[in-house]
Image: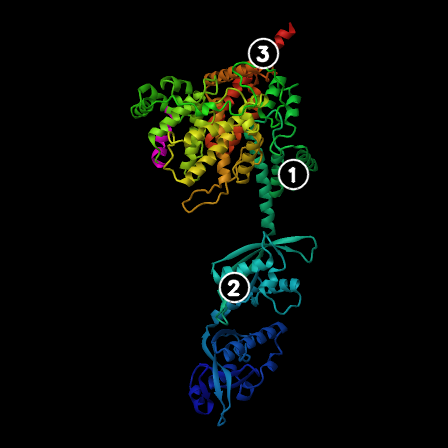
């Protein structure tokens, strides 16, 4: 249409006979150039009045109406006459529209189109780009009435309503919205969406500019059906106060230009926000009451001393701050955290642990029990004591690091026939063996019974059965013969110590197996324990006390044992368990993993090393603290920490892979496996009472034997290791209180499926408390006589 040239001298008669009003408008001078008879009749004027300048006829309109007329006229000039577009408008009585004169009819609603046309005037060759206006429809008065009512409703609606174009420019707004914009933006003529959003602050991390970009993208690019977001609006009339507003944006079409637009509605939601805050506070109170009720019903164990490390205390403080609970952070609490960090020699050890235990020895714990726990758990190394030259024949002379390693290279007593016999036994298990193995998935297990029915082969039989049952042998193409030979060789490497023997290794293996398969580590929705990690778990349990000397690390360090010298006093026994086992595993005779991929072998070795080193009780608090912190940061453990928190759990924020599994980072996986082996290493604490007491008696005898060695070598006897005094039986309450219960409780909080093991530990704890009460009452009775 923009390329069509209209010659009025030739074509005017054609338009004259049209029943529809048609006329030509010049937006530059705001005048009608020509109109047909129907157009003159529409406005009820003669030709001279029809061609008069329209600006002069707008004096009766308000400044706001005049401003809108000028804006629309500029749009007609740009869109129609310059860019040759066609636009459609709706005209009502009393509304100023370019090209339209005052309508004489009382009620009318017209639909009109604006098209570009090139006009040639008379005989001259001069041409002008003008606008051809044609009334395309006249709406019935009833429709106009309804439209007027809708306009009135819109203008007086309590919700602010705006219409913006794709560039964010304001096209229209109801009366309340315009009053509000003037209040905030003053006399600004060029209202736009970006300026309006800049009045307040977003509820979140986005600023006004980001909010604007996000909204425009949501409506015009993503074409969302509705885009909503709240904003905090500060009051200009009431300084210091604010109100919440909610923006709702819908994609729309400008009825004038037929171009894309966005309809914006704004409503005050301050009361809604206030109600939300009230409900939130009420919910917090109810949660606190619920936690208190649960604590009374099933109290969470609190150790006799403060075992929170400086790292734990710092994380708790930061957690409160990050959750917006600044009012709960007192200056005293902040000062305590500061002092704890300054005083601590190790941020992963309880503050003043030794001093706390000795102080409690006057009230809660026996002095020797406190000293025993310090020796077991404290990272402070004991001072070496000078020994006489005459040592027992069974005590190696200090200073020769290789003298105690000769058993690594000892010739294996495992025969080919014994290997074949165990493999054959697994294929056709005797009834008594099958009966015991059928309970390997139970939370409580009797490894002594397994030792009886297996002919003294509890570890190798159980290890091979588990690896076959879980498909690890086939998965990693393990050589059956070399595997069984390795298992039997490791089993033979466990000395006949009262406690640290092959039966203990089998018991730890079974406990770790149950924790993995029933305790939540091998759940279908996450990857804490894949096939490689499962193999790592089994092998770690199998070798974790290989070639144990029957004494603790402190003893080896005190006498400068070869292992202590070799490993620089750092976990000498645990390092030896690993080194001796891997030397076996790497030899051709026992290399059952030769077909495993190198990457998998590297992962396997790394996990085994980390898990076995974690069984050194000197690392207990460091590992426990890291576990608490890691699982809490991932939303799994309550913020109470170390067993002092509530029962509620936060949802885990793990990222999820395409197959729906929760993705676990390697550090977290490693820490979970370490703590799982630590729990399994203390697994007899969850055994039936009679089995548990049997294990304690054997451990007490092993400690007495170390005390005998210490006497023989003129060393001061370690606490609770003197055969002529009470042994570790009287230390069980303290050990459960400070070590066992917090550890198992933390694990059960992270993995609720492991709660049965925690319940069994609590049962044995109750047993020792009952016995301690009887012992105390008996002593009191004797003292009173």
Q: Nearer the viewer, residue 723 or 269?
A: 723
Query: Residue 56 location in percent, x, y?
Result: 61, 82
Asked whether the residues under the numbered discs 1 and 3 touch, taking CB atoms below 8 Å apart as contact, a structural biologist would say no
Which quadrant is home to the N terminus?
A: bottom left
Instruction: Label 1, secondary structure: give it.
Output: helix
- By secondary structure, the bulk of the magenta-drawn segment is best described as helix
Q: Nearer the viewer, residue 140 or 375?
A: 375
Q: Nearer the viewer, residue 512 or 476?
A: 476
Question: Does residue 444 appear in the picture of this structure?
Answer: no
- Inter-mark Cα distance, 2 to 1: 45 Å
> Which image quadrant is residue 457 in?
top left
Instruction: Label 3, secondary structure: give it.
Output: loop
Query: Residue 582 location in percent, x, y?
Result: 44, 31
Q: Which residue is mark 2?
A: 262
Query: Which disc is residue 725 wearing?
Result: 3
Question: Does residue 248 appear in the picture of this structure?
Answer: yes
- Inter-mark Cα distance, 1 to 3: 49 Å
Q: Residue at x 62, y 40 (%)?
A: 318
* Closer to viewer: mark 2 or mark 1: 1
Asked whether the residues under the numbered discs 3 and 2 touch, taking CB atoms below 8 Å apart as contact, a structural biologist would say no
Q: Which span is picked out in magenta?
A: 461-476
Instruction: Label 2, secondary structure: give it.
Output: strand
Please tell me how crowded label 2 is: few (under 14), some (14-19), or many (20+) other residues with Cα within 10 Å: many
Q: Which residue is mark 1?
A: 328
């Amino acid at each position: 249409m923009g390329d069509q040239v209209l010659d009025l001298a030739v074509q005017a008669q054609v338009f004259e006979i049209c029943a529809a009003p048609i006329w030509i408008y010049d937006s530059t001078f705001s005048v009608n150039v020509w109109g047909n008879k129907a157009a003159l009749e529409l406005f009820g004027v003669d030709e001279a009045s029809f061609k008069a300048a329209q600006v002069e006829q707008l004096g009766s309109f308000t400044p706001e109406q005049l401003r809108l007329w000028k804006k629309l006229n500029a749009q007609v000039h740009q869109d129609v006459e310059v860019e040759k577009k066609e636009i459609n408008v709706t005209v009502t009585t009393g509304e100023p529209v370019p090209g339209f004169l005052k309508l004489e009819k009382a009620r009318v609603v017209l639909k009109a189109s604006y098209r570009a046309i090139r006009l040639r005037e008379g005989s001259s060759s001069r041409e002008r780009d003008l606008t051809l206006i044609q009334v395309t429809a006249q709406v019935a008065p009833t429709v106009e009435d309804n439209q007027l009512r809708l306009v009135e409703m819109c203008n007086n609606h309590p919700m602010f309503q705006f219409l913006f174009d794709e560039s964010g420019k304001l096209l229209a707004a109801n009366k309340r919205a315009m009053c509000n914009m003037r209040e905030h933006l003053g006399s600004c003529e060029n209202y736009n969406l970006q300026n309006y959003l800049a009045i307040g602050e977003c509820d979140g991390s986005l600023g006004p500019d980001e909010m604007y970009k996000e909204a425009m993208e949501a409506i015009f690019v993503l074409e969302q059906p509705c885009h909503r977001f709240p904003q905090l609006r500060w009051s200009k009339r009431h300084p210091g106060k604010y109100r919440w507003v909610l923006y709702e944006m819908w994609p729309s079409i400008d009825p004038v230009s037929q171009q894309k637009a966005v309809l914006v509605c704004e409503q005050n939601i301050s009361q809604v926000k206030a109600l939300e805050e009230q409900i939130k506070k009420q919910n917090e109170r109810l949660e606190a009451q619920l936690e208190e009720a649960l604590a009374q019903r099933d109290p969470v164990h609190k150790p006799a001393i403060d075992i929170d490390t400086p790292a734990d205390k710092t994380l708790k403080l930061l957690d409160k701050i990050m959750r917006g609970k600044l009012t709960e952070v007192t200056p005293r609490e902040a000062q305590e955290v500061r002092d704890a960090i300054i005083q601590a020699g190790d941020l992963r050890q309880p503050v003043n642990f030794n001093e706390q235990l000795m102080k409690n020895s006057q009230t809660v714990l026996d002095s020797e029990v406190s000293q025993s726990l310090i020796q077991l758990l404290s990272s402070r190394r004991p001072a070496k004591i000078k020994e006489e030259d005459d040592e027992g024949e069974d005590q190696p002379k200090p200073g020769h690091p290789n003298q105690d390693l000769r058993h690594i290279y000892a010739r294996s007593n495992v025969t080919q026939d014994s290997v074949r016999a165990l493999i054959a036994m697994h294929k056709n298990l005797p009834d008594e063996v099958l009966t015991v193995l059928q309970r390997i998935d139970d939370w409580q297990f009797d490894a002594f019974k397994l030792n009886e029915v297996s002919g003294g082969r509890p570890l190798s039989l159980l290890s091979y059965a588990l690896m076959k049952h879980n498909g690890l042998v086939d998965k990693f193409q393990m050589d059956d013969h070399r595997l069984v030979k390795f298992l039997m060789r490791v089993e033979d490497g466990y000395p006949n110590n009262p406690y640290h023997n092959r039966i203990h290794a089998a018991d730890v293996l079974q406990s770790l197996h149950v924790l993995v398969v029933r305790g939540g580590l091998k759940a279908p929705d996450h990857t804490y324990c894949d096939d490689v990690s499962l193999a790592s778990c089994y092998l770690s349990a199998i070798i974790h006390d290989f070639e144990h000397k029957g004494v603790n690390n402190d003893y080896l360090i005190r006498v400068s044992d070869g292992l202590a010298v070799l490993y620089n006093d750092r976990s000498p026994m645990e390092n030896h368990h690993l080194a001796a086992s891997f030397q076996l595993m790497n030899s051709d005779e026992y290399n059952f993993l030769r077909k495993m991929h190198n990457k998998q072998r590297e992962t396997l070795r790394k996990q085994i090393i980390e898990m076995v080193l974690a069984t050194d009780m000197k690392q207990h608090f460091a590992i426990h603290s890291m576990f608490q912190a890691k699982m809490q940061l991932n939303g799994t453990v309550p913020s109470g920490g170390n067993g002092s928190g509530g029962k509620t759990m936060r949802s885990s924020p793990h990222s999820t892979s395409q197959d729906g599994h929760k993705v676990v980072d390697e550090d977290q996986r490693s820490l979970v496996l370490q703590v799982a082996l630590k729990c399994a290493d203390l697994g007899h604490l969850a055994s039936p009472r009679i089995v548990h007491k049997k294990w304690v008696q054997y451990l007490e005898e092993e400690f007495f034997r170390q005390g005998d060695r210490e006497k023989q070598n003129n060393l001061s006897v370690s606490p609770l290791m003197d055969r002529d005094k009470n042994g570790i039986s009287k230390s069980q309450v303290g050990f459960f209180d400070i070590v066992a219960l917090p550890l198992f409780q933390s694990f059960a909080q992270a993995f609720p499926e492991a709660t049965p093991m925690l319940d069994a530990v609590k049962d044995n704890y109750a047993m020792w408390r009952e016995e301690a009460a009887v012992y105390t009452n008996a002593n009191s009775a004797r003292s009173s006589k």
